[in-house]
């Protein structure tokens, strides 16, 4: 089921949480809402789920206006950041809840409920925990039970609010892959909120980058990483070096007061200036981090460090040491007028 | 070095035997003197002239009527404040609205003012010379110096118990579980009965026990509005005072022993509730 959002705005007092949002979520797609905290991504998710009401704009599921429908009538599965499992119920009863609260006529028999709950628990690979209470589970297990519970009502749309936010790094990575596989099996239209760019790029079919209640860019993980459309996206996703036109005129071309954005791995290092665009720098620091070598260089003592990433092979072909005088030139960069530049708020 | 360290630790966390004994002794003496002895005295005086007289003083019509009135008052006040307490705690803990802090202050008001003042307020409002006095008289409704007045003041005085117990508990639990329930298709009532209520049941029971104890034991406020009409508007605490002032010590202590017994039963039930709550893994305060 597709989701269409048109001119959606939401205000909390004086704070504009969402400002004229337009978004289309395709049927069966796994979409990530990515942005720093306070950018409005969770508010947008809660509006889709029916837990908040927008001040203006339209929300359609499969072309049908759902604003007047409250949360229980939207057939949306919601997975909360802190799981929100019912603490007084066993895992089994948690998953069965959505089936048990159905009107008597639609409620299946006890045997059927049992079969379906065990099927769901098997899907999340936790059937052996069916008689435990939430307090007795680990964070990763709770999250999977929360997912099974949301799936029990056979939702057409699945919404996940920072699904892995409260878990430690290793479990997070594992669950990420698991969620991706699960989505490929079930094909439910899913939207998840995250502030972790790696998570969004790894798991989602499409990433929507948000900032200050607006959508900065929507695209495939590759698009938002390789071709950011705004300075904010450039800075929020991956590392980037900034070159002001005042200091590095040739790189930012002629646009007056402008800034060139260059990714660390898009910079070449050479012993000689091959053309007028090359910048003479001094190597300040060389660090090998796993498969890449990170080199920090500076134009002169007072300027900021420029970060460059080289693959091991390239580094080994032309080794560097701190103190070396070299020339750098960008292979790829993007120029934004200073007026367009957005501030990068803390994530 | 190591041994020096461990000796220091012992010194800082342990006292010598004599100090330990002294501290425990002081605490026990305090307990016996201010709690144990009075309780013992109540039962000792009540039974001082024998079991038969004790029994007779409880069966005396005025005493029996006081017992009945106390039970009636509690039977009205406790359910009323149960419903109110849940509603208030639910609103305060789960929703944001203007005037919330004012509401919290108002709930605390009965704790803050002297019970005598609480009683007096009702006399000023509904008494013969009060604001609504003439209107009530014209319609032949009697509140003050009658049972309805006693119920009203008791409700007022026991107002905060349930709400106060539930607000921090419900605030700690947040509203995510209710939101989850609704997103799973539950109606508001289903979310309340299946999620909210089970989550607060121990805290609620605890609040009800305290509320009941106070409803039965309230003296000051009830004393102002009751008029002390024997066999009509006397509750147990008031009846104890009247009997005592008449030097009828056995009867006074006999009725008092019932109140003391109530306190003991309350404590017992409270311990049972706490024990049960702990055993079921659901703490009274703060959710998992």
Image (cartoon, rainbow, N blue to C red):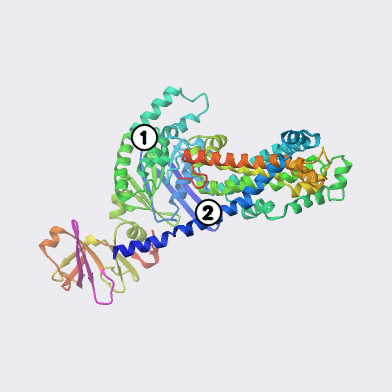
How far from the left and from the top, in percent, is residue A149?
42, 35
Identify the residue position indicated by label 2 in the image. A11
Circle count: 2
The chain that hosts pointer 2 is: A
Residue A237 appears in which quarter of the rendering? Answer: bottom left
Between residue B108 and residue B237, name the one nearer to us: B237
How far from the left and from the top, in percent, is residue B186?
52, 34
Would residue A220 be visible to someone looking at this image? yes
* Quadrant housing the N terminus of chain B: bottom left
User: Circle 1: is it few (<14), some (14-19), or many (20+) Cα within 10 Å?
Assistant: some
Q: Is residue A109 left or right of residue A235?
A: right
Q: Is residue A10 magenta?
A: no
Would residue B86 be visible to someone looking at this image? no
Identify the residue position indicated by label 1 in the image. A129
Q: Is residue B71 left or right of residue A182?
A: right
The residue tagged with tag 1: helix, strand or loop?
helix
Contact between labelled residues 2 and 1, with CB atoms less than 8 Å apart: no
User: Circle 2: is it few (<14), some (14-19), or many (20+) Cα within 10 Å?
Assistant: some
The residue drawn where x is 29% and y is 48% is: A170
């Amino acid at each position: 089921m597709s989701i269409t959002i048109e001119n959606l705005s939401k205000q909390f007092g004086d704070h504009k949480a969402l400002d004229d949002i337009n978004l289309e979520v395709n049927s069966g797609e796994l979409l990530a809402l990515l942005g720093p905290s306070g950018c409005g991504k969770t508010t947008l998710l809660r509006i889709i789920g029916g837990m908040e009401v927008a001040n203006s704009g339209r929300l359609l599921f499969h072309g049908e206006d759902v604003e007047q429908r409250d949360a229980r009538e939207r057939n949306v599965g919601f997975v909360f950041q802190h799981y929100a499992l019912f603490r007084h119920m066993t895992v089994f009863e948690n998953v069965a809840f959505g089936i048990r609260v159905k009107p008597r006529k639609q409620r299946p028999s006890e045997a059927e409920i049992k079969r379906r709950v065990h099927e769901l628990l098997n899907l999340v690979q936790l059937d052996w925990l069916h008689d435990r209470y939430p307090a007795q589970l680990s964070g990763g297990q709770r999250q999977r039970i929360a997912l099974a519970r949301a799936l029990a009502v056979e939702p057409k749309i699945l919404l996940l609010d920072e699904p892995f936010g409260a878990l430690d790094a290793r479990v997070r990575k594992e669950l990420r892959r698991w969620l991706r596989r699960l989505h490929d099996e079930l094909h439910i239209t899913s939207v998840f909120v995250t502030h972790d760019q790696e998570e969004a790029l790894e798991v989602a079919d499409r990433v929507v980058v948000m900032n200050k209640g607006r959508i900065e860019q929507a695209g495939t993980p590759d698009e938002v990483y390789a071709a950011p459309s705004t300075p904010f996206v450039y800075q929020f996703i991956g590392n980037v070096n900034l070159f002001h036109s005042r200091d590095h005129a040739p790189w930012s071309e002629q646009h007056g007061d402008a800034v060139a954005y260059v990714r660390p791995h898009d910079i070449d290092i050479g012993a000689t200036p091959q053309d007028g665009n090359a910048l003479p720098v001094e190597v300040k620091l060389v660090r090998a981090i796993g498969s890449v070598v990170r080199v920090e260089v500076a134009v002169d003592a007072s300027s900021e460090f420029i970060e460059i990433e080289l693959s091991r092979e390239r580094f080994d072909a032309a080794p560097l040491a701190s103190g070396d005088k070299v020339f750098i030139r960008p292979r790829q960069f993007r120029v934004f007028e200073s007026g367009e530049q957005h501030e990068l708020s803390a994530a | 070095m190591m041994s020096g360290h461990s000796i220091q630790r012992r010194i800082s966390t342990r006292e010598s035997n004599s100090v330990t004994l002294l501290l425990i002794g002081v605490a026990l003496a305090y307990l016996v003197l201010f709690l144990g002895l009075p309780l013992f005295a109540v039962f000792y005086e009540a039974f001082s002239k024998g079991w038969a007289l004790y029994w007779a003083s409880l069966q005396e019509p005025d005493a029996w009527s006081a017992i009945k009135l106390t039970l009636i008052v509690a039977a009205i006040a406790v359910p009323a404040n149960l419903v109110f307490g849940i509603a208030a705690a639910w609103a305060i803990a789960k929703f944001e609205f203007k005037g919330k802090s004012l509401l919290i202050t108002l709930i605390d008001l009965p704790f803050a003012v002297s019970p005598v003042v609480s009683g007096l307020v009702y006399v000023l409002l509904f008494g013969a010379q009060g604001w609504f006095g003439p209107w009530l008289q014209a319609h032949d409704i009697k509140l003050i110096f009658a049972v309805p007045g006693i119920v009203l003041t008791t409700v007022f005085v026991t107002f905060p118990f349930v709400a106060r117990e539930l607000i921090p508990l419900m605030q700690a639990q947040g509203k995510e579980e209710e939101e989850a329930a609704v997103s799973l298709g539950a109606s508001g009532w289903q979310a309340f009965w299946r999620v909210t209520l089970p989550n607060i049941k121990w805290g609620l029971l605890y609040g009800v026990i305290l509320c009941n104890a106070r409803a039965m034991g309230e003296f000051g406020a009830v004393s102002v509005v009751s008029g002390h009409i024997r066999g009509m508007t006397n509750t147990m605490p008031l009846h104890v005072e009247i009997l005592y002032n008449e030097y009828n010590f056995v009867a006074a202590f006999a009725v008092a022993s019932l109140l003391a017994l109530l306190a003991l039963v309350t404590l017992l039930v409270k311990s049972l509730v706490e024990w049960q709550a702990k055993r079921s893994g659901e703490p009274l305060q703060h959710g998992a």
